[in-house]
Image (tube, rainbow, N blue to C red):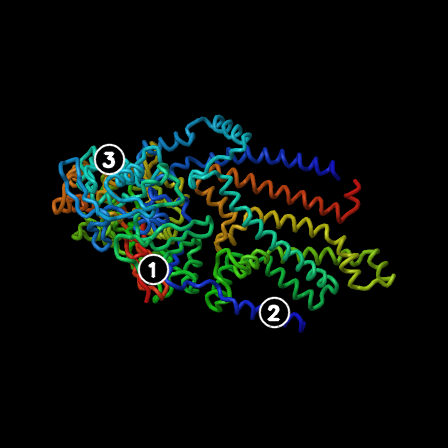
């Protein structure tokens, strides 16, 4: 296991290095940040000064060399827009997105396991049909529309919840609910499908024949094996949210990494683009490693390979 | 099931028992469209920075009256031109900065030099003083002398953007703790969360009613509008047309923006005035108004709005006359002008609400009278590259969507940039216009106004460098608990001291 993790970490490091090179060059293909940053009435001389000052006149390989040397010294550059180290800007944003992702995924995972398992218990039954319709509707709902409608209903009309903002427990309800909708819908379907297969397998029948209680059959014997595909999909969904819950962050005014990344791309703030992608990539690679560990815990065959 | 029902009921009761944070007390909550990148006074001309700092934290020597564009005293009580290149300002006495320093001619010099520091990218310098060398000097405790390298008859108007920051502020841009003499002092900036100001007890002027201000930001216009309705915020300075649905709370006002299509007159067939006139006759502005554009927009006749010095009120908008447009095109064609050449309409995505729809509608109108036009919508960076010099040699005939903002009081801030032969965004060149710009820029008073008005007439009637569209309106939503009406200046400032409570 230890050897496996070391190998996995090494692979991740190589992917990361490749990603950084790609992002560096792709970002610069978008053009000169001065055209966006300086007022439209700025003189040509002012534009040239700006380009010069930020080293954007140098050949791209010189800029890349400088970036690599700075990176080796732990310097990720300064945000042109915010006039602050890019890493400070990114480290302010990433906890916001990670806390949203963590809470949303825990709730989505737990609730979908319970509902998916119960739906699989009697396929075609009333509970199954209701759960399937609700989860499919959830998986297909446009979250932008749901979010704005929820604000109009719960904040403007009923006055129960704050429209937006980050603060007390009430401010978490709508963003988390919107974030959960899609992973929940998808996970219920995966849990249900996986459980139906597992519940019809021989070892479950054996357990029932031995007189094991039905609740234990579902949640202890069957669920563990049914979890492998669920973990894969959940990992994928978690990585998606960690990569930026852009719509939720934008609508509810949560200053997370998704919005920061999009803004920095639009504004050509290269240092922030590079740093936010670097930090997000580290988070996603960590999630992937965590998924691998979860596999090993759930499935002894993987653990002993 | 019973258990589930009681859980749901319990949750609903718990939620309704705790009400969300409300706009209350005498603190004004302003919801902006985005978080400012810095809160540095030298960036006060950027909308979301200006709405926080300008005339709230930092004040200017002179202020522009949004009603008529005239100038009035603020930190300077009087001013006079002592020679062609020199102006003298008498400064207000007894004014203190928030950190306790005295405001006087020496600190004013420090503030001006900070704003115009050539090593910094401050917008005040880049936007308004790019071509002017300014040398400020204290010639008495409260007498400031400002010399310029070229004649600047409107230096007092230019001083309406020159904010007076505290002398102890860091000399470089990027400050996150602005200090000024304004009625409100900076308290905190929680990145991603809010900026908080409180009333400054040592303010030289009248004590404002609002005790403080809190600035928050939401990118979605629908959310900003909902926040006012839900009583979570007091002022949303700009909301989209489709969200301005509540007549009691929403105010429309001329926001000093003027929208047009810039005609690249250097490229055939756009170098023929009949072609340019035909384009203006082809556009049905009445059909656009109240559908794609707000009902309140005003057809433009020139690049500046009526409250700006130099606006010519005698000019009439182009009427919609497709028959005349076709006739002009036929006449040009008969004279050998290649009117069938493909003309590119380059628009900018989200330049204003419904920007794409506006371009599509005008594309259809121009096609209808016989133009061979092709529409291309591009993102902002690509748009900027083709909007400013240097222009590409092989650009071909282009109509470029543009929108220009001038709320600074005088036409000089518009006309040189847009229409002079060397203007950074000009695709026209006419000696008479250039001479007019030079003469008007050097004149003062009535003579100046008349000279600008003649330039406007020449452009409108004899040159036709634009497909003219509208002077635009903005929408603000104001909480019913406030007594406050937004004005043209809302694009660059929002004076909390002017906010009253009902």
Query: What residue sits 24% from the left and 35% below the top?
Result: B134
Q: Please tell me if label 3 and label 2 are on a single chain.
A: yes
Q: Which label was assigned to residue B210?
A: 1
Q: Which residue is mark 3?
A: B134
User: What distance separates the C-alpha of mark 2 from that of mark 1?
Assistant: 41 Å
User: Which of label 1 and label 3 is nearer to you?
Assistant: 1
- Total number of numbered labels? 3
Q: Position of residue B5 (x, y in %)?
A: 63, 72
Would residue B361 be seen by someone viewing this image from the given angle? yes
* Marks 3 and 2 in Cβ contact (< 8 Å): no
Cβ atoms under marks 1 and 3 closer than 8 Å: no
Q: Count neighbours of disc 2 (C-alpha within 10 A) and say few if under 14, some if 14 to 19, many if 20 or more.
A: few
Residue indicated by mark 2 = B8
Note whether A256 is above or below B296 in the view shown: above
Residues A247 and B101: in front is B101
Of the image marks 1 and 3, the number of the one nearer the N terminus: 3
């Amino acid at each position: 296991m230890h050897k496996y993790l070391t190998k996995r970490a090494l692979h991740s490091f190589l992917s990361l290095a490749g990603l950084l090179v790609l992002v560096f060059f792709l970002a610069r293909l978008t053009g000169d940040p001065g055209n966006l940053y300086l007022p439209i009435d700025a003189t040509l001389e002012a534009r040239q000064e700006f380009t010069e000052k930020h080293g954007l006149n140098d050949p791209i390989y010189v800029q890349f060399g400088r970036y690599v040397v700075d990176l080796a010294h732990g310097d990720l550059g300064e945000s042109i827009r915010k006039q602050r180290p890019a890493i400070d800007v990114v480290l302010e944003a990433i906890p916001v997105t990670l806390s949203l992702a963590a809470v949303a995924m825990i709730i989505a995972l737990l609730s979908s396991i319970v509902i998916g398992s119960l739906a699989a218990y009697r396929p075609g039954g009333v509970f199954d049909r209701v759960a399937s319709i609700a989860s499919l509707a959830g998986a297909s709902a446009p979250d932008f529309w749901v979010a704005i409608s929820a604000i109009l209903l719960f904040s403007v009309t009923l006055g129960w919840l704050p429209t937006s903002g980050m603060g007390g427990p009430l401010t978490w309800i709508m963003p988390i609910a919107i974030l959960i909708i899609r992973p929940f819908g998808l996970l219920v379907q995966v849990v249900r499908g996986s459980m139906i297969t597992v519940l019809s397998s021989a070892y479950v029948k054996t357990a029932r024949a031995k007189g094991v209680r039905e609740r234990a059959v579902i949640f202890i014997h069957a669920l563990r094996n049914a979890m492998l595909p669920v973990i894969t999909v959940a990992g994928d969904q978690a990585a998606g949210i960690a990569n930026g819950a852009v719509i939720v962050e934008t609508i509810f005014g949560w200053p997370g990494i998704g919005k920061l990344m999009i803004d920095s791309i639009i504004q050509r703030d290269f240092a922030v683009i590079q740093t936010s992608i670097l930090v997000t990539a580290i988070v996603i690679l960590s999630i992937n490693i965590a998924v691998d560990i979860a596999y090993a815990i759930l499935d002894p065959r993987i653990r002993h390979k | 099931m019973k258990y589930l029902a009681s859980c749901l009921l319990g949750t609903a009761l718990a939620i309704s028992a705790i009400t969300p944070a409300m706009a209350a007390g005498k603190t004004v909550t302003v919801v902006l469209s985005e978080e400012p990148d810095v809160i540095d006074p030298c960036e006060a001309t950027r909308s979301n920075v200006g709405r926080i700092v300008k005339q709230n934290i930092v004040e200017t020597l002179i202020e522009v009256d949004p009603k008529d564009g005239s100038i009035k005293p603020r930190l300077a009580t009087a001013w006079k031109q002592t020679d062609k290149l020199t102006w003298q300002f008498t400064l207000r006495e007894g004014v203190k900065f928030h950190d306790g320093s005295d405001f006087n001619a020496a600190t004013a010099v420090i503030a001006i030099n900070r704003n115009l520091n050539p090593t910094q990218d401050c917008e005040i310098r880049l936007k308004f003083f790019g071509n002017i060398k300014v040398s400020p000097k204290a010639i008495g405790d409260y007498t400031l002398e400002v010399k310029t390298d070229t004649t600047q008859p409107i230096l007092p108007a230019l001083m309406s953007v020159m904010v007076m920051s505290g002398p102890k502020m860091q000399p470089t841009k990027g400050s996150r703790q602005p200090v000024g003499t304004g009625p409100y002092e900076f308290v905190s900036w929680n990145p991603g969360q809010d900026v908080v100001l409180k009333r400054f007890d040592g303010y030289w002027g009248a004590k404002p009613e609002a005790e403080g201000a809190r600035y928050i930001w939401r990118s979605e216009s629908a959310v900003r509008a909902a926040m006012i309705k839900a009583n979570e915020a007091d002022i949303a300075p700009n909301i989209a047309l489709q969200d301005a649905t509540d007549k009691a709370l929403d105010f429309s006002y001329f926001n000093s923006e003027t929208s047009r299509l810039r005609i690249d007159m250097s490229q055939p067939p756009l170098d023929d005035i009949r072609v340019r006139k035909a384009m203006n006759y082809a556009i049905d502005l009445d059909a656009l108004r109240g559908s794609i554009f707000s009902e309140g927009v005003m057809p433009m006749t020139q690049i500046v709005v009526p409250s700006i010095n130099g606006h010519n009120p005698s000019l009439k908008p182009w009427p919609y006359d497709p028959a005349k447009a076709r006739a002009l095109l036929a006449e040009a064609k008969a004279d050998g002008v290649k009117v069938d050449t493909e003309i590119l309409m380059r628009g900018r995505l989200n330049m204003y609400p419904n920007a794409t729809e506006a371009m599509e509608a005008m594309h259809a109108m121009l096609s209808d009278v016989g133009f061979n036009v092709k529409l291309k919508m591009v993102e902002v960076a690509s748009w900027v590259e083709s909007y400013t010099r240097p222009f590409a040699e092989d650009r071909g005939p282009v109509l470029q969507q543009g929108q220009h903002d001038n709320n600074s009081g005088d036409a000089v801030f518009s006309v040189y940039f847009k229409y002079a032969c060397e203007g950074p965004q000009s695709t026209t060149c006419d000696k008479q216009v250039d001479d007019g710009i030079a003469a008007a820029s050097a004149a003062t008073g009535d003579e100046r106004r008349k000279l600008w008005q003649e330039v406007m007439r020449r452009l409108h009637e004899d040159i036709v460098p634009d497909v003219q569209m509208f002077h635009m309106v903005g929408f603000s939503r104001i909480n019913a608990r406030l007594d406050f009406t937004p004005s043209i200046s809302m694009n660059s400032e929002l004076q909390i001291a002017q906010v009253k409570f009902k």
